[in-house]
Amino acid sequence: MSWGTVELEPEVRDWLEALSAALFARTQEIARARRAYRRCVERAHGVPTEEE
């Protein structure tokens, strides 16, 4: 399944390309944890998603 493409700023693209596979995986793990935490806080406090 294709999700499409995103055009990145050159400095962001260079930063991502410079990451090692292990560091890239860790970065993704941190991002998933942040999203999960935010969902928990939103549910607990009734924060509408439109405010993001």
Image (cartoon, grey):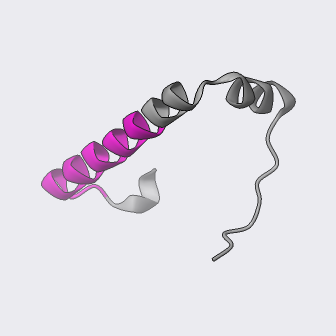
Which residues make up the magenta segment? 28-47
Residue 42 lies left or right of residue 48; in this view the side is left
User: Compared to 27, does 2 lie above or below?
Assistant: below
Observer-nearest of 6 and 27: 27
The residue that appears at 13% across and 53% down in the rendered structure is 44
Q: Estimate the x, y position of residue 48 in percent, counting from the top left.
A: 33, 61
Report the residue at 63% width, 77% height from top: 1
Q: Residue at x 36, y 47 (%)?
A: 35
Q: Is residue 14 left or right of residue 41?
A: right
Q: Main secondary structure of the magenta part?
A: helix
Q: Is residue 1 magenta?
A: no
Q: Residue at the far front: name it.
A: 21
Q: Is residue 17 above or below residue 31?
A: above
The spot of residue 7 in percent (x, y) is 82, 48
In the displayed structure image, the side of residue 34 where residue 6 appears, left or right: right
Residue furthest out toward the bottom: 1
Give the total number of marks visible in the rendering. 0
Q: What's the residue at 71%, 22% (across, down)?
A: 18
Indicate whether 14 appears above or below 32: above
Any magenta on residue 39? yes
**Residue 31 sits in quarter:** top left
Horizontal and vertical percent for residue 2?
68, 73
Q: Nearer the viewer, residue 28 or 8?
A: 28
Nearest the eye: 8 or 18: 18
x%, y% of residue 24? 54, 32
- Toward the left, the furthest residue is 44
Q: Is residue 15 left or right of residue 52?
A: right
